[in-house]
Amino acid sequence: MKTYKIKEPIWDGGIGKRAIGLATFRVPVLVDIVYESQGERVYPDTYVVTKEFADKYPIKKYKNSPPLYIIPIEDLIVTETH
C-alpha cells in the first residue's frame, strides 16, 4: 500500500472538526499528516484508509480539486505496521 503525505489538515465547517481531504482515486492508502507546530508533528501517527472505511464519509469537490473524501482526523485508524 502506498503512503501519501498530507502537508496540512483542513478545517471542515460542515463537521466542525479538523479533517483530511483525500482524493477518491488514492484509496486504499496509508496517510502521514506531516503538519508541524513548533517544530514537532501534530499528528505523528500513520493512518490506514481503506475503500470501505472512506466510503462512510462525504465526498466534496473544491474548485479544481478532484473529488475528495472528507475524513475527520479523530476518526482515522492508526496503522499497526508503523
Image: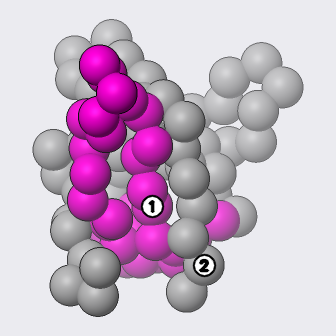
Establish if 74 lies above or below 47: above
Task: Please tell me the numbered disc located at residue 31.
Answer: 1
Task: Give the CA separation, mark 1 to mark 2.
Answer: 9 Å
- Residue 38 seen from this side: yes
Mark 2: secondary structure: loop
In the picture provided, is 61 more to the left or to the right than 58? right
Mark found first going from the N terminus, 1 or 2: 2
The residue lying furthest to the front in this view is 39
- The N terminus lies in which quarter of the figure? bottom right
Near mark 1 (Cα within 10 A), the count class, few <14, some 14-19 or many ≥20, is many
Q: Nearer the viewer, residue 67 or 72?
A: 72
Magenta highlight on residue 44: yes
**At 32% across and 65% down in the image, what residue appears?**
47
Quarter of the rendering containing residue 3: bottom right
Q: How is the image coloured?
A: one colour
In the picture provided, is 26 more to the left or to the right than 64? left
Question: What amino acid is found at the position of numbered circle 2 in the picture?
Answer: Lys
Establish if 65 lies above or below 82: above
Q: Which residue is mark 2?
A: 2
Residue segment shown in magenta = 26-54
Q: Nearer the viewer, residue 55 or 9?
A: 9
